[in-house]
Image (cartoon, rainbow, N blue to C red):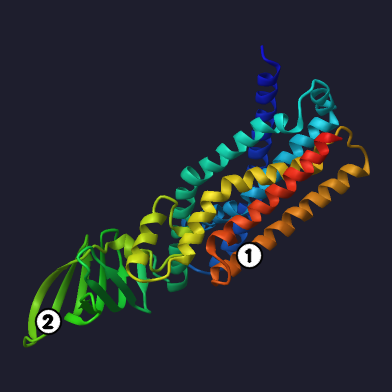
Amino acid sequence: MNFFAILSRYVTRQLLFNFFMVLFAILGIILMFDTIEALRRVSGREDVTFWFTVQYAVTRITKTVEIVFPFVLMVAAMITFWRLSKNNEFVIIRSNGVSMFSFLRPLMIATFLLGIANVVLFNPVAAKMFELHELLSYRLQSHNPNAVLFSSKGLWIRETDDMGRILLIQAKSLRQDDDESVWMRDVMITELDKNSQIKESYNASFATLDGNTFHLKDVKIMINGEPVQTVSDYAYETTIDVERIKDNFIEPDAISFWRLPNTISFYEKAGFSARQHWMRFLNLLISPFLLVGMLMLAAVFMLQNTLRGSAILWRVVISIVTGFVFYFSSQVVYAFGLNGYIPVWFSIAAPTLIIWLISISLLIQSDEV
């Protein structure tokens, strides 16, 4: 049997085993502290059940997992490489003529596939859990255990349809008590032409959104050149639905990878900035490459022919410090991109590109030794 195929399966299994071991250990620690914090917040609240507390703690954990995911991979890779060096397995591998990059290639492929699975499979779950956590947080603050969507600050949406119409939809307050319709008060729908001139206006004291239709009550209809009409009921068709309204009240982190392109398109067609959503989308796209970069960074510090005594401790400390410095630096660059000081693509790609270039150059130097 091919030696390299056996080696690839062996080291890949080691990496994945250590990854899930570290991940579940960190999940347990995070969940413990989140549960303690949740219990502290609900202490003395007779209206909060134990099941609500469990949901509140569990739904918060997925957002934390997304933050620590690259560090979990880096720690898992460090453990894998340390064991290979400690047992002299890496010395044997190198003595068989396997280069550094040949050895890392199957691990890089496995890491990249793990990153893709994180984006396309775990991220939609994490986004839904984050959205649910925001909802539970509001229910906890408002003492309303049945609220689904509520905003005392009102609603303001601008929509552009395929016919060139521009709709301005405003409501002073809105609320959703089930998963199908939204209730609004003091609603105004203004229709503009391509030159942003007002064509029609609909003022209603009350409205519900069912599907893509606004059902307006006690409506005053104002059309240019015509007298004001007052009707008790009026159905106004739009392309807006409940999910689109929710997107106005939730963070980009609560929108899944698959929904982000449509959300970005909606905001850009409506004339709003979608910078936050673009950055979130690009950040998810590049995250598999970031994981591979963290793997190579761990290899730089932990893959040596001999690692003994204090050298191991120093390398572990330096690698962890380097990882955290990289994380905080990337957050600074991200903030510059978010505020428009640098291009969006540069703020997302630059940190990953830097870690790739540094890691590859150091691995090449190590491979020549």
SS at circle 1: helix
Please state, as top left, top right, bottom left or bottom right, where the N terminus lies in the image: top right
**Mark 2 nearby-residue class (10 Å; few <14, some 14–19, many ≥20):** some
Q: At x 22% / y 68%, what residue is drawn?
A: 164
Q: At x 65% / y 28%, what residue is drawn?
A: 13
**Mark 1 nearby-residue class (10 Å; few <14, some 14–19, many ≥20):** many
- Residue at the spot of label 2: 221
| Amino acid type, callout 2 | Ile
Residue 166 placed where, x, y %?
Answer: 25, 73
The mark found on residue 145 in the picture is none
Q: At x 65% / y 52%, what residue is drawn?
A: 353
Residue 344 placed where, x, y %?
Answer: 53, 63
- 154 and 102: which one is in front? 102
The mark found on residue 333 in the picture is 1
Q: CA distance from mark 2 to mark 1?
A: 49 Å
- 155 and 228: which one is in front? 228
Q: Is residue 174 above or below residue 365?
A: below
Q: At x 52% / y 42%, what residue is drawn?
A: 116
Which badge, 2 or 1, comes first in the chain's sequence?
Answer: 2
For the question of whether residue 148 can be seen, the reply is: no
Residue 7 placed where, x, y %?
Answer: 70, 22
For the question of whether residue 150 can be seen, the reply is: yes
Q: Quadrant of residue 350?
A: bottom right
SS at circle 2: strand
- 291 and 98: which one is in front? 98
- Compared across the picture, whether 78 is left or right of 126 comes to right
- Mark 2 or 1: in front is 1
- Compared across the picture, whether 122 is left or right of 25 comes to left
